Image (tube, helix red, strand yellow):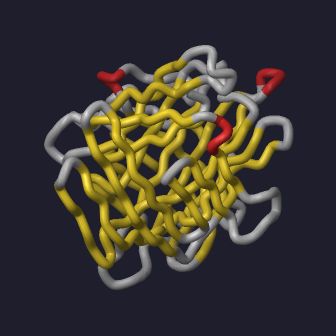
Amino acid sequence: MPLQVWATWFPRDGKPQSYIQGFPITGLRISSRGQSPFYLRIGNNWIEENSCGGTLEVEGHSIAWNLRYGSTFRTTLSSRGWIGFSRTPHSDALFSGGITLDGRSFEGEPLGFGVQGHNCGYRHRGFWTWAHVYFPQPDRPPSTLEALVYDMPFGLLFRKAVLWHEGKQHVFRNLRERASPRGAGALGRIPSRNNFRWNFCCSSNDGLGLQAEFDGMGESIHCLPYMKTDCSCSFEVTNNSLARALVCLQRSGAAVQHLETSLGAVLEMAGRGE
């Protein structure tokens, strides 16, 4: 069916499992353009500006969630009228509430951290690479980095990264692939499952240099069946929501600052679309 609600379970020491339930288009309820507050509802599933919830019954599995989230930073990575947009209302989100999967309950205040975002377009791009990482800081607010590359018409390439660090936003538009002995692929080219990594460097107008390494190897690599927007068929998107990341920040005359996490990053790549 044209509307889908997904739930994906990423166990720390096991293979991911996805549960997808379809709904008819007549079941969609969504706020009007520019309306506030934002909401989207499909059956018993809903997303609002600061919360989400729902229930799924898929192939004998039962999933339910009721979550609240808040953050200190939001950004728009891409907004192209003829292509769509990629926006992140909650880049350094803290989630509270509960999730139930086949009778197992997970609750917390907070329950976890991550990202909440919205993507919209009349079709999927031919390829894209997207990554987000959340760096908890023991004695100060968290830092986040989000980066996106995709193809555009006429052979153009969109590329942008946004860093939220020490209460300040840094925007990077000149992502360049970094050579690596581990052999990450070129920007816009999708490495195999045996080399699911993304390394790049860039600099901002305010003089901050950044080098990033995303490593999506391990059991948490997962292929997701994205449906084309005309519902004609599906194509695979590779994702790891328990990826590792290392970011190095450099200013002229200052020592290099390192940010690192062993499971706080998500890396996603697709090599074909509609």
- Quadrant location of the N terminus? top right
Residue 198 placement, left or right of 37: left
At x 30%, y 60%, the residue is: 99
| Above/below status of 7 relative to 113 | above
Residue 98 placement, left or right of 237: left
Q: Position of residue 144 (x, y in %)?
A: 48, 63
| Above/below status of 226 relative to 119 | above
In which quarter of the view is residue 72 placed?
A: bottom right
Residue 85 placement, left or right of 218: right
Q: Position of residue 130 (x, y in %)?
A: 53, 41
In which quarter of the view is residue 105 placed?
A: bottom left
| Above/below status of 256 relative to 108 | above
Between residue 182 and residue 245, name the one nearer to us: 245
Between residue 171 and residue 118, name the one nearer to us: 118
At x 28%, y 35%, the residue is: 17
At x 48%, y 59%, the residue is: 115
